[in-house]
Image (cartoon, helix red, strand yellow):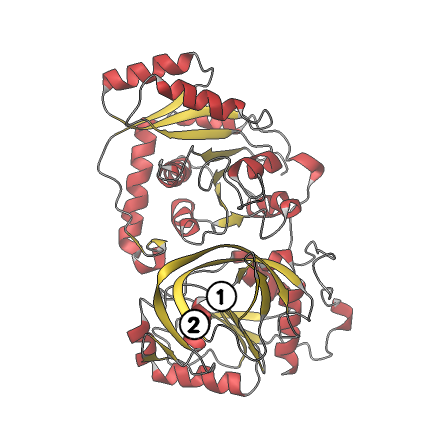
């Protein structure tokens, strides 16, 4: 298990073609009958949806900032259980990490934590012999990062390919694929990146199939699989992460996960409703797994379609997504908005992140929302993006005061006021500010967090569902 064959797909910079190559490779290997484990470096929720289409398995994130470097290998091994091969799509440029944190959370950092060979995707459209200097620089920058091959993207002609190969002979890095200039595979974008799979299912299936065909035609799949099989055991002797007994970070939290032997005598599985559908597509798979392991019955629902919460709902989780795109439809579903407000009004646990925060507001772009929070949300002009260090300001259904977590913000909306009388977090960005809302059983914030880094969150939430 710890020696699962694996590749990291990286690039010198964003826009080089990583997503096309990584997703296409996943689908091409799966078409060969391999069980492929898909992974994405960083906090991005959208690419894993395309990875899941390509492989038929849940797309998972590997984020050394949100979860800590020590959880990268265990989370990888958890996702790769039973697989023949793993493909990890990188983030930004190979050596680009969290701002001001050196290599932390970069693709190179994750590749080293996994002991995985790197395939560098290079946009060769405006260069020939210079490609050798570029590849040599990336391959030699950090001796602990093993660049095992190059895939040349946007190659113009046979002669262009010949010049590129000739130049790369001197760099000592084999060319494992050549993709010609072509009309880009149709993956439409908007204000926060690619449009998620859930919003364009049929077209997304076609796009992934096109990526697979492009990569299978232009890449040496046998050589790429051979490179993946040169990866030995994952460094450090890591065991797979498990939601039943997850690794805990005692230095980050003022509270440990609940001991199963001390749980309430009421053993009923409380129903935790989790928002999904096209408006709420941002969620890490481990959250549902942690809730289930803590004793909850997790039931998905779609706020665009369902007029009531799932039967016997005891707690509600509303993650990220695009409510601003669907504000009219969400507002028109008045029965569900009323049900959410009633559940929150009874003091039931409600955890809302980013899109969930907007949905709980009084209004979004002038359209009525649930009215749980006395705040108004609107589209803004600037993108808010970046990692955050956060501390729980007070006790809530997710954490006790003083719990430290790392999160990520990614939105173009503004909520006014930005914090309630009882804020959710004290956030350093780099100046400390108060953010989010805690009232009764509600914890609402812009901050996306990864609960695997602090499993006490899921345990505490489910226990509150039992007792509320």
Q: Position of residue 183 (x, y in %)?
A: 21, 38
Q: Nearer the observer, disc 1 or disc 2?
A: 2
| Residue at the spot 46% in from the left edge and 84% down from the top edge | 341
Q: Is residue 187 above or below residue 356?
A: above
Q: Say which quarter of the image contains residue 151.
A: top left
In the rendered image, the quadrant that contains the N terminus is top right
Residue 139 is marked as none
For label 2, the residue is 415
| Residue at the spot 65% in from the left edge and 74% down from the top edge | 394
Q: Residues within 10 Å of mark 2 (few under 14, many from 20)?
A: many
| Residue at the spot 69% in from the left edge and 53% down from the top edge | 247
Label 2, secondary structure: give it.
strand
Q: Is residue 184 left or right of residue 307?
A: left
Q: Nearer the viewer, residue 18 or 136?
A: 136
Q: Position of residue 364 (x, y in %)?
A: 36, 75
Label 1, secondary structure: give it.
loop
Which residue lies most toward the right here?
A: 261
Do the residues bearing badges 1 and 2 touch, measured as CB atoms within 8 Å? yes
Q: Nearer the viewer, residue 121 or 229?
A: 121
Q: Is residue 45 above or below residue 371?
A: above
Q: Position of residue 353 (x, y in %)?
A: 49, 67
Can residue 226 be seen in this snapshot? no
In the rendered image, the quadrant that contains the C terminus is bottom right
Q: Say which quarter of the image contains residue 81.
A: top right
For label 1, the residue is 446
Label 1 vs label 2: CA separation? Answer: 9 Å
Which of the two labelled residues, at mark 1 and mark 2, occupies the earlier sequence position? 2
Which residue lies most toward the front here?
A: 431
Q: Position of residue 419 (x, y in %)?
A: 52, 74
Q: Say which quarter of the image contains residue 270.
A: bottom right
């Amino acid at each position: 298990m710890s020696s699962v064959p694996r590749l990291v797909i990286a690039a010198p910079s964003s826009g080089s073609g990583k997503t096309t190559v990584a997703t296409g490779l996943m689908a091409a290997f799966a078409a060969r009958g391999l069980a492929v484990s898909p992974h994405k470096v960083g906090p991005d929720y959208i690419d894993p949806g395309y990875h899941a289409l390509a492989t038929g398995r849940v797309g998972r994130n590997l984020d050394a900032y949100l979860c800590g470097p020590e959880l990268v290998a265990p989370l990888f091994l958890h996702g790769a259980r039973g697989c023949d091969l793993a493909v990890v799509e990188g983030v930004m440029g190979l050596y680009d990490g969290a701002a001001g944190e050196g290599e932390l959370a970069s693709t190179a950092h994750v590749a080293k934590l996994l002991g995985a060979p790197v395939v560098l995707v290079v946009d060769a459209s405006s260069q020939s012999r210079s490609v050798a200097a570029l590849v040599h620089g990336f391959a030699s920058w950090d001796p602990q990062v093993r660049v095992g091959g190059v895939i040349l993207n946007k190659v113009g002609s046979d002669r262009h390919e010949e010049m590129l190969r000739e130049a790369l002979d001197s760099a000592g890095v084999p060319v494992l694929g050549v993709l010609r200039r072509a009309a880009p595979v149709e993956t439409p974008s908007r204000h926060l990146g690619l449009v998620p799979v859930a919003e364009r299912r049929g077209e997304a299936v076609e796009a992934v199939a096109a990526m697979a065909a492009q990569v299978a035609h232009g890449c040496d799949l046998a050589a790429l699989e051979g490179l993946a099989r040169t990866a030995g055991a994952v460094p450090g002797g890591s065991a797979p992460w498990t939601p039943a007994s997850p690794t805990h970070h005692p230095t980050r939290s003022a509270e440990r996960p609940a001991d199963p032997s001390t749980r309430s005598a009421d053993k009923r599985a409380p129903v935790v409703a989790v928002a999904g559908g096209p408006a709420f597509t941002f969620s890490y798979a481990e959250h549902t797994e942690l809730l289930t392991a803590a004793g909850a019955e997790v039931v998905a629902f779609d706020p665009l379609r369902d007029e009531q919460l799932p039967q016997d709902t005891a707690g509600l989780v509303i993650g990220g997504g695009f409510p601003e795109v669907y504000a009219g439809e969400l507002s028109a579903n008045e029965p569900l908005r009323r049900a959410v407000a009633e559940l929150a009004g009874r003091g039931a646990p409600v955890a809302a992140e980013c899109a969930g925060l907007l949905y709980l507001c009084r209004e979004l772009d002038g359209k009525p929302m649930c009215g749980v929070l006395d705040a108004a949300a609107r589209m803004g002009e600037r993108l808010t993006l970046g990692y955050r260090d956060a501390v729980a300001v007070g006790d809530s259904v997710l954490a006790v005061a003083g719990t430290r977590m790392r999160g990520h913000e990614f939105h173009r909306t503004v909520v006014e006021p930005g914090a309630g009388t009882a804020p959710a977090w004290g956030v350093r960005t780099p100046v400390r500010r108060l953010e989010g809302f805690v009232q009764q059983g509600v914890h609402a914030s812009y901050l996306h967090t990864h609960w695997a880094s602090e499993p006490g969150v899921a345990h505490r939430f489910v226990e509150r569902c039992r007792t509320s």
